[in-house]
Amino acid sequence: MDAAQALLVITNLPDEASAQLLAARLVEGRLAACVSILAPCRSVYRWQGRLEGAQEIPLLIKSTPQGYPALEAAIRADHPYELPEIIAVPIAHALPEYLNWVVTETRAEAPPKDP
């Protein structure tokens, strides 16, 4: 399995409830194999000419390049921010079995069940 077949997508949500909801929708829709919801952090940024700060909940989303367009569209559709941070980082190296799991879990059809 080639590591280039997986992406780590990063976004931030304003609160735990919206983070939980988006994470569940992405995994249920097979747009992500896994979404890690991290501890709140403080972001400082410039928005519309003003210095701003906000507490945010970071999400680490494991997906594939093939599924990225639909994943991005789903994040944009469900994200409360006017301009959400959506950053996709190619995974250069990873455990091959983990990469296979990411690819399998993001296929449109459900993987076969173990007997």
Image (cartoon, grey):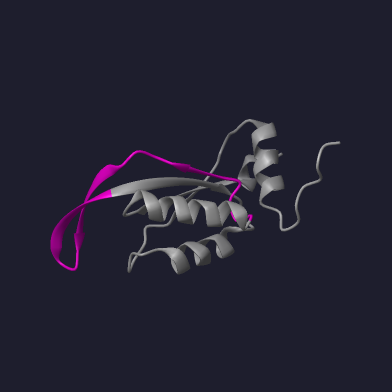
Q: Position of residue 86 (x, y in %)?
A: 42, 57
34 magenta-colored: yes
Q: Position of residue 56 (x, y in %)?
A: 30, 49
| Residue with the most extreme front position | 17
Q: Position of residue 98 (x, y in %)?
A: 65, 35
- State the image quarter where residue 115 is shown: top right
**Residue for point 60% across, 33% down:** 94
Residue span colored magenta: 30-55
**Residue for point 34% across, 66% down:** 83
Left/right placement of residue 40 relative to residue 75 reads: left
Residue 18, above or below 77: above
Left/right placement of residue 78 relative to residue 15 reads: right
| Residue with the most extreme left position | 50
Left/right placement of residue 13 relative to residue 6 reads: left
The dominant secondary structure in magenta is strand
Total count of labels: 0
Closer to the camera in the image, 49 or 102: 102
| Residue with the most extreme top position | 95
**Residue for point 69% across, 33% down:** 97
**Residue for point 36% across, 52% down:** 12
Question: Can residue 11 be seen?
Answer: no
- State the image quarter where residue 99 is shown: top right
| Residue with the most extreme right position | 115
- Quarter holding the N terminus is top right
42 magenta-colored: yes
Question: Can residue 113 be seen?
Answer: yes
